[in-house]
Each structure stands twice: as C-alpha cells, then as structure tokens.
Amino acid sequence: MGLRFYNTLTRKVDPFEPLEPGHVRLYTCGPTVYNAAHIGNFRAYVFEDLLRRYLKFKGFRVTQVMNLTDVDDKTIKGAREAGLSLNDFTRQFKDMFFEDVKTLNVEPAEHYPAATDHIPEMIGLLEQLMKKGFAYRSEDGSIYFSIKKFPAYGRLAHLDLSGLKAGARVAQDEYEKENAADFALWKAWDEKDGEVGWEAPWGRGRPGWHIECSAMSMKYLGESFDIHTGGVDNIFPHHEDEIAQSEAATGKPFVRFWLHCAHLIVDGRKMSKSLGNFYTLRDLLGRGYSGREIRYELMATHYRQWLNFTFDSLQAARAALDRLDEFRRRLDLASAGSVAGRMPSWVEVARAGFVAAMDDDLNISGALGALFDMVHAGNKAMDAGETDGAAARAALDAFADMDRVLGLLQSAQGTADAAIQGLVARRQQARAEKNWPEADRLRKELLALGWTVKDTPRGPQLKKA
Ligand code: AMP
Ligand code: ZN
C-alpha cells in the first residue's frame, strides 16, 4: 500500500509522494516563545519528530523548518510585563525550548528561523498582496487581508461563510471560527508596542502572526511544498490564513499535505496555560521521570487521537521501556563477539508489521505492538536456546534500525552506553570462568559509574544506581 497520511485538506487518507522525488519539504509551526512550553506543546513536536524520522527511515531526505514566533501579541505583552526588551524576554524561552527538545530526543530541524530576523521577507510578501489587491490599509495604518477576494478561503477548516459580515475585521492573532473576518497582516504601531516596531512603506508597525509562517516557510521551502503540520488548534485561523496569504501572493498551491495532531488533554480538557492545568517538561523531570519516559508517553498514542495525560500512563511508559531495555541487554550479551547472521523469523515478522503500521498514517500503536511481539517471541526463542550469537546480532541490528524512528534507545538519559555494556559483558565472562574476585571488581566499577547489576535467570539486569 505504501506510505499514506490523513490530510486535513482532503479529509481522507491520501498516498504520499513528495513533489521533488526523494526529498520531503516539511514545515512545522514552532513555539511562541513567551513562556516554557507545556507537555501539550511537546506532544505536537514529538509527533512531528516521529513523522520526520519515519520519512527518513523510508529513505527520503527531509528538509524541516520550524519557526520561532518571537514577535506577536503574546510575546510583546510578556516582555512589557517583565520589563524586558522583546529580545531579552524571548531569548530565555528559546534557550529553554532547545534544551527541552534535546531532553526529549527530538531531532533538530534543518532551519529554525526566528520571525524577527525575517521582517523584510514579510514586508515583501505584503507588498505583493497589496499590489494584487488582496490586502488593504485601514484608517490606523494596519494592513488587512480581504477574505472575500480569495474564494477558496475556509477550505481547510470547512468554514461556512454565508453569514459573514462584509468588511468585518479582526486585529488579534487568535480568534474563533464564528469571528472569521478580514485579518491583520500588519499591525500599526501603538503605545502598547513600546520599542517593538519596524518601518514599512505604509508606516511603522509589526507583522501579524500568520504572515510570519507564510514568509518563513516559502523562503526556506519554496512556494509549494509537501507537508505542513501543527496541533488541531492551528487549523483555524492560523493555517487557514497562511493558505490565503501564500496562495493569493504566488498564485500557486501552497502545501499538499496538512497533518494535525489532536490535543493532549487532562481530565477531558485541553492542556493549556490559560486553563492552568498544565505541566512543563521540567515539572515532570522534577518528579523523577526521564526525558525518554516522557517521550514514550507523548508518542505512544496515535497522533490523531486525544492523548489523556495521567501519571499512571507515565508509569506504564517506564515499565514498557524497562522491558525494551532488558531485551536489548539480553540481545547484547547473546550477540557479544558475533557478526550478524540471517534475521530470525520473529524479527522479520516484527519488522514487516512495524513498517506496515507506520506506513498507515503513522499507526504507532500497531508499530509498538509489532515491537513488543518481537520482544515476546525473542525472549521465548532465547529461553529455548534457539538463538545463536549471529541471530541475536541480526535482531539487535533490526531493533536499532526501528529505533531510528522511535528514538527510545539512543537517548542520553537512562541508557547505558557501549562502554558500560562492555563492562557488563566482561563481568559475565568473569562469572562464566568463576573468577569471582574479577566479577566483583567489575560490579564495583559499574557502581562507581552509576549502574547496579542484578543477576537473574535471564542474565544480568542493569539499572541506574
Ligand atoms: P503555541 O506555542 O501555542 O503556538 O503552540 C505550539 C504548538 O503546540 C502548536 O502546534 C499547537 O497546536 C500545539 N499545542 C498547544 N497545546 C496543545 C495540546 N494541549 N496538545 C497538543 N498540542 C498542543
Ligand atoms: Zn505557524
């Protein structure tokens, strides 16, 4: 069947091929840097990471752009309240964001453009829109997009525009579907903006939020590109407005595939700053959960389903990872010194199941199911003594390959590196030779490095001390 995605634009699952063979151009709406992102935001970034990694797994080169919204209504308000310049205010949250995505083992995008570095591109786009008659200047010097000039307006969000009030305008960056109206492309400076403002041919002001993403995506990815993503709250107005601005300016289709993740919810409600029901990544790290446990939790529910966040499910994520770690250790030991041989059938079946599931709109539940079936079958095969070193090595390689997509084993946190695994293997060797003083010495060496070893019938178990 091949790779396919549910496309918000067509409302169906469409087969995926990039416009340029072998190369996927992907735009992912990034953080508004006015506070520490909460784990709801990270659900979106982890979903996008899974998408990116799977595209690479399928052999595509990926160029991903994630913008940083460092000027909009919220950042300006935050800077004013903190008594800081816009730059000083947003810098701290940019730094925090990059630290957090690293903790979650999210692969870096190719470009992280900041809105404040692309004002000339936005002004250029605005000039095009004005020249073509899609934009007009209001009394106060702001520039608005005229939605009646763009008949396709509302296609993404399936808006019914019959009750639309002619000429109605909305100045805020965020508004409800019911208030669909001409939206601000450029906001004339007023005293609330303080020092924030840029000179444009039509007067001093600042860009609206939506034009930022149009300008930055097209600069780095071209006028038409493959995939654009975000959370479902971005469908309207943000993405609807992006399509209108971009297609009106270029006369070309903007994006072919729109993918949106459902929200992370708490007690049935969207996790958000305004409801006060949020956890930041740091809150959870402070409670003793690791980055990869949180990654697992955020990733393991299909992106189009609500993810109900609970501490019980985080606990279950921990148990699932323990199981994967233990299996990997077992394969490590069983394969020590061997080169990969033929893939055992239980690996072949798992790999095929993994790919079939992920091809189907990133069906992660199916993919993880295939992986855990492999753990089960592999343990059984090893218990029965049916797996030699060469088979274990082949299994290990296949596991590592699938983990290029999942990003669960290579995380810096909580996973023993090769040197530690080497010490464990040497200790096993010493035990096999009944060289107890050496085995004991190696146990102490591991402890000094922060790892305890427990000997079980299935082999040694390594845990963070
Ligand atoms: P923002 O910084 O508010 O622009 O949001 C950044 C990204 O996080 C956007 O793609 C949002 O759609 C997404 N997002 C915000 N809240 C949630 C949530 N509770 N669950 C999933 N995604 C969210
Ligand atoms: Zn955006």
Image (cartoon, rainbow, N blue to C red):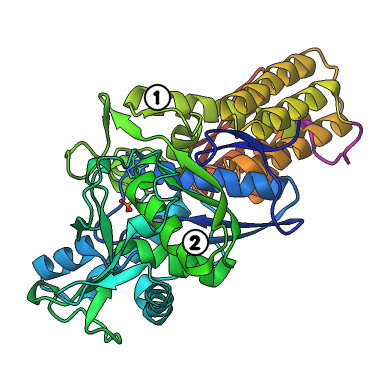
User: Residue 313 bears which disc, if any?
Assistant: 1
Quadrant in the picture for the C terminus:
top left
State which quarter of the image contains the N terminus.
Answer: top right
The residue lying at 31 percent from left, 31 percent from top is 265
Relative height, residue 197 to residue 355 (above, below): below
Q: Out of 398 and 117, give the one closest to the viewer.
A: 117
| Residue 68 in sight from this viewpoint | no
Per the image, the residue denoted by label 2 is 247
Q: Residue at x 73, y 16 (%)?
A: 377
Percent coordinates x, y for residue 420 in the rendering: 62, 46
Residues rendered magenta in the picture: 334-342
Q: Position of residue 441 (x, y in %)?
A: 61, 42
345 magenta-colored:
no
Q: Which quadrant contains ligand 2? A: bottom left
Residue 251 location (% of width, % of height)? 54, 65
Q: Is mark 2 within 8 Å of ligand 2?
A: no
Q: Is residue 338 magenta?
A: yes
In this rendered view, identify the residue nearer to me: 342 or 36. Answer: 36
Q: On the rendered structure, is 141 left or right of 239? A: left
